[in-house]
Image (tube, coloured by chain):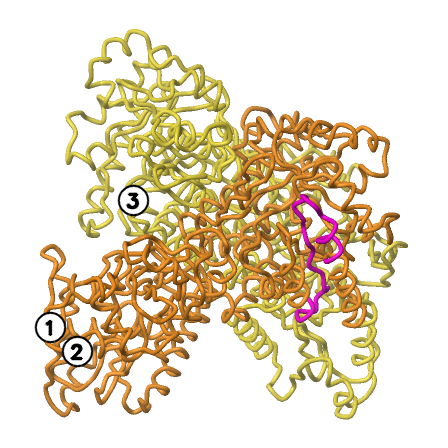
Chain colours: A orange, B yellow
């Protein structure tokens, strides 16, 4: 039912199939009040390109439309050609304290009216609920989810995750509910957090839920209708949002913007490019509820599309960091993210297109840089030099001239140059690797960033065995270095680069395995940089210009397979699939039996049979958790099939 | 010709009158290529609501259209009903090295074709020009400006400011050119800075130019057509922008966005709400130059309107701080602003509507907070207490309960509570003053901000005579304080507040003058806060709920006038205007003879005759420089006329 087409960390562009068409995610579901829709569902489809909407089964079941909707079905009642999701009444229990309907009744009703997605009746955990109370409600929500899964018949079920602010409960509820036969997992109980701008708590709740959720299920964030939160929620892996805000705010004379809410009466020029604002004077818009609702819809749909654009471009983090400046509470949420880096990092790709922009002290704490620093510690073998030449960020050798000076210093003295970058220490031979090679930083970064750079550097240097007395600052000290140094040293710069990159990318020891024997290079005529690496005449690696990492060749993969025991670097596929991969066919998730938990999206991987025979080299599209969960989609793109030894 | 209607610091919403209608500023002037307009001028007026456009007189004068435009005039040629500004060819000299026309010829030609605004032929200073070369070019530019002013006849002239990156030259050129009879001052030579994202240099150039410019003249920033720079440029006092970018970028298949530029071919969902993007698939837009140009226009016009919205709402600083996260070079520009705080502060209002949002470590350096910290040092009399109780930001007494604890501590010990806020130290009796009373900060601010708060606090405490040993941290130490304290102390909280606020607002000594005699209060029944202050039965001050400052009453003004010698707090008006102000009429700038250079927009002021007789109490709308420069508009809104003693 759900297939991921593109991803950027936990965020993804996907397609959700329904009986009433395909829905591209992230998607916004406008909430339609069946009694008085301010913008007709027909208009939502045609003018706003809504592929799905949401309405309330509880209200339909209690009101005067009950008989009509049971007779005609919800699509005909609303006159909407796309998919219709229905909600159950759990939110009404939050508002009114209780609802007069059972879980079983709500499920049966949604089946009867033809909902494309029908929601169970979960118990709404309020943020302030104690652990005991929330645990009891989670138990009951899980019981009802099971009941709903039994009763659902052909209904695509929306299972709910509750648990208040208790992270363990959220994770447990998510795990249990998403293990059932549900089509969508919905994170509930978050409206009170969003209403009071408790975005940091919202981050905690979403992350805890995502940890438990089956990653192959699309995730709905219940009640998230303000464009302010779309980028952050999508970044954390939410795929569906529903907006009652467009109508509710219009009723109060308020306008939604990507950076907040404003009273229409206080706005003279909205500064909005939407069809409403660009064609009419504010005085007319401000007093017209329908125009306000249309503005709100335009802005909300555009905000969701902007998230999709950012996912496709790989710059959703930048968007989140920019948007965080719309409200101090969003900034708090941004600063909370680093607490969850170990989890977020699992979903980070090896690299992203384009340059990394420094936009504040938070940038250095992105999970992809957290990984860089960790891998540097775990995988990079410190140079055997007797000291480190710590270069300031700005002195990175963009120019050949500067590089020559550094090379001279290297040759003259037994020191190793390391850039003290804002992202973490960068030994000069890793300077070409993304994002270290491609990043834009301000001329005068803030003190937090500079201090963090210092801390990153010192921690790494100490861990790598360099004492304080072995650190030299800046390029000005070259003369001093010469004086203090034990003597000239020969450096094969190309070899250093290849070795360091291979270890960083595949693990410590990879360089030894890949480069065993006589090493030769093919060098680019244009850039003078290494392009292909051969060992004993075998083409083992190709360097990618776009991110400075290697593409792995079959010969290289064979060497790595010998050096690294299972499960390292492996994707284990079903025996039946092996012949296809040997011929170069991609690895589909449903045929993956297991995989290295250290693999990340875009990592190079060895595709092996259950008996650990190498059958292809591939570029992963998912991490292990995802490969094991998804029944649809490509788990890894095969670069090169490896014929069986028998057939060779 | 130019009148300011609203302002936010140096930024302003104004009206520029032309023979072809009124132009609301900030305004965007689309550049129209007369030979092949991609969007017709008629469409620009009707569909994009353009009130003014710009085209090139040099190109018109050289090309095949020369005879037509001389015969029909530029408006008929372009078929545009609004105002037309023409450029002179100076930019062409930057591109091609030279132009085959003289300043006098260009001026005559622009007169002949009926330009509403015609530009002199200045010499384009390249950023890398040395001081000597730039100085010679500035001399020639000034000479030509004078020549143009002599030749212009009825033409509204655009004078140009050059001077490369040399701040003194920029200021001198600006001063000389804007002292002539010009309608608009244009800052030139900045396109190379914007093309290479040298926004920090752009800030320096604009500030240096603004220092020299007559503040009553509208300022055009030549070649600024990317929405990325509109908020920053407007914040620094630029009123007009011209965009060739909408068409040039469209020709290259690029789309403008408020946060940058993207290749249309790489964008699947634009995430833009404009009429083009919200009604058509990207695949269609991406290959259609005209649609791209329309998108670019929608986005650019909306960006200018957004700036107007922000000026009217008083939150342009927030917009600039948010937008700075679109590119590291913009962040550098934002961090540059604090270097110019002494100048920027002169234009800052006393307070702004709404809360101040903390959006990064740069917020604390806004000029309005720079002023607060300076005034605190200069105007606030430190409490005679024997120590300071330094309260952390979060412990600010939002709740009565907390306030009671602090009051107890106060009563028990001889210490004075001061919040160590991110904005600077806040003695508790100033806690109700904007923005200290109304600000939103994150729960976990970044270290730069916390460190700055510490530095602000220590510097002030030391300056106020508190030694380190006299500082107590936090509210936890109340018991400790009791033990160490010399004894209970009576505190009249209301009196402390009124005194501290009066001194901060009007200057040290104001409280003594205003409160001489028996002080009584009228207290609000709703809030329990002081509303009116009476001294010996005279109503001297009213406290404003919206910003915590005072409105000055006539009785208070009389007391201040005695206490503070001229020119302090005064606006000196023409003798002829005195009777009108005595009757409560507003002060128009053209009748202002002089004013206190410490007056700021929204400050309370004494309106006096040339002989220093008090004739009204007013709220300033301008600072001194502006009052003396403007010939139009209100310099101060009179609250209360003061009848002459003779007539009383």
Q: Residue furthest front?
A: A646
Residue depicted at x 28% and y 12%: B69
Do the residues bearing badges 2 and 1 touch, measured as CB atoms within 8 Å?
Answer: yes
Residue B297 position within the rendered picture, expressed as x and y whole percent measured from the top left: 42, 30
Residue B617 position within the rendered picture, expressed as x and y whole percent measured from the top left: 71, 44
How dense is the environment of label 2, judged by Cα within 10 Å: few (below 14), some, or many (20 and up)? few
Q: In which quarter of the image is residue A131?
A: bottom right
Quadrant location of the C terminus of chain B?
A: top right
Closer to the observer: label 3 or label 1?
A: 1
Residue A366 position within the rendered picture, expressed as x and y whole percent measured from the top left: 45, 65
Residue depicted at x 34% and y 76%: A376
Residue A406 higher or lower than B217, as above or below? below
Residue B311 higher or lower than B499, as above or below? above
Q: SS at mark 1?
A: loop
How dense is the environment of label 3, judged by Cα within 10 Å: few (below 14), some, or many (20 and up)? few
Taking the image as drawn, is residue B529 in sight?
yes
Q: SS at mark 2?
A: loop
Magenta residues (range): A146-169
Alpha-carbon span between mark 2 and mark 3: 49 Å
Q: Name the residue under label 2.
A: A516
Residue depicted at x 32% and y 91%: A467
User: Which numbered dot is residue B195?
Assistant: 3
């Amino acid at each position: 039912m759900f297939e991921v087409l593109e991803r950027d960390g936990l965020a993804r562009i996907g397609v959700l199939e329904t009986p009433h068409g395909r829905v591209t995610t992230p998607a916004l579901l406008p909430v339609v009040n069946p009694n008085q829709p301010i913008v007709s569902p027909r208009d939502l489809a045609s003018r706003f390109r809504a592929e799905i909407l949401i309405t309330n089964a509880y209200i339909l079941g209690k009101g005067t439309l009950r008989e009509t909707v049971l007779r005609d079905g919800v699509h005909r009642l609303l006159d909407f050609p796309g998919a219709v999701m229905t909600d159950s009444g759990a939110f009404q229990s939050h508002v009114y304290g209780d609802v007069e309907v059972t879980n079983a009744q709500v499920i049966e009703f949604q089946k009867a009216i033809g909902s494309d997605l029908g929601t169970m009746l979960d118990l709404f955990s309020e943020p302030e609920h104690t652990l005991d109370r929330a645990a009891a409600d989670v138990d009951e929500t899980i019981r009802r989810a099971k009941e709903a899964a039994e009763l659902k018949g052909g209904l695509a079920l929306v299972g709910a995750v509750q648990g208040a602010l208790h992270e363990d409960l959220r994770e447990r509820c998510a795990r249990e509910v998403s293990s059932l036969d549900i089509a969508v997992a919905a994170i509930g109980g978050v409206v009170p957090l969003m209403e009071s701008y408790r975005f940091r708590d919202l981050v905690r709740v979403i992350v805890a839920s995502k940890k438990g959720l089956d990653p192959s299920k699309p995730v709905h964030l219940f009640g998230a209708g303000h464009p302010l939160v779309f980028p952050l929620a999508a970044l954390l892996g939410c795929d569906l949002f529903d907006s009652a805000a467009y109508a509710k705010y219009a009723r109060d004379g308020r306008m939604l913007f990507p950076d907040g809410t404003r009273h229409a009466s206080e706005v003279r020029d909205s500064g909005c490019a939407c069809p409403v604002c660009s064609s009419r004077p504010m005085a007319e818009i401000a007093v017209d509820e329908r125009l306000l609702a249309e503005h709100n819809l335009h802005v909300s749909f555009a905000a969701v599309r902007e998230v999709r654009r950012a996912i496709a471009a790989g710059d959703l983090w930048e968007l989140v960091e920019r948007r965080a400046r719309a409200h101090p509470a969003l900034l708090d949420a941004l600063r909370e993210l680093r607490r969850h880096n170990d989890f977020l990092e699992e979903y980070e790709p090896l690299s992203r297109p384009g340059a990394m922009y420094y936009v504040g002290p938070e940038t250095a704490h992105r999970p992809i840089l957290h990984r860089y620093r960790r891998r540097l510690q775990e995988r990079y073998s410190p140079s055997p030099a007797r000291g480190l030449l710590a270069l300031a960020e700005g002195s990175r050798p963009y120019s050949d001239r500067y590089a020559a000076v550094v090379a001279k210093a290297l040759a003259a003295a037994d020191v190793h140059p390391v850039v003290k970058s804002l992202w973490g220490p960068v030994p000069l031979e890793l300077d070409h690797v993304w994002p270290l090679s491609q990043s834009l930083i301000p001329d005068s970064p803030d003190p937090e960033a500079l201090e963090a750079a210092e801390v990153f550097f010192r921690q790494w240097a100490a861990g790598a065995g360099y004492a304080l007395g072995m650190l030299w600052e800046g390029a000005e000290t070259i003369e001093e270095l010469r004086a203090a140094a034990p003597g000239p040293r020969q450096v094969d710069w190309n070899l250093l680069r290849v070795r360091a990159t291979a270890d960083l990318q595949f693990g410590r020891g990879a360089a030894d395995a890949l480069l065993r024997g006589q090493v030769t290079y093919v060098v680019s005529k244009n850039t003078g940089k290494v392009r292909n690496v051969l060992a004993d005449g075998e083409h083992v690696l190709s360097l990618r210009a776009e991110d400075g990492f290697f593409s792995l060749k079959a010969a290289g993969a064979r060497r790595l397979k010998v050096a690294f025991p299972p499960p390292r670097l492996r994707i284990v596929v079903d025996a039946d699939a092996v012949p296809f991969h040997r011929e170069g066919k991609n690895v589909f998730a449903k045929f993956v039996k297991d995989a290295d938990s250290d693999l990340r999206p875009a990592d190079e991987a060895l595709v092996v049979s259950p008996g650990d025979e190498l059958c292809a080299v591939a570029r992963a599209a998912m991490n292990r958790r995802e490969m094991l969960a998804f029944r649809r989609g490509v788990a890894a793109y095969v670069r090169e099939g490896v014929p069986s030894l028998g057939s060779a």
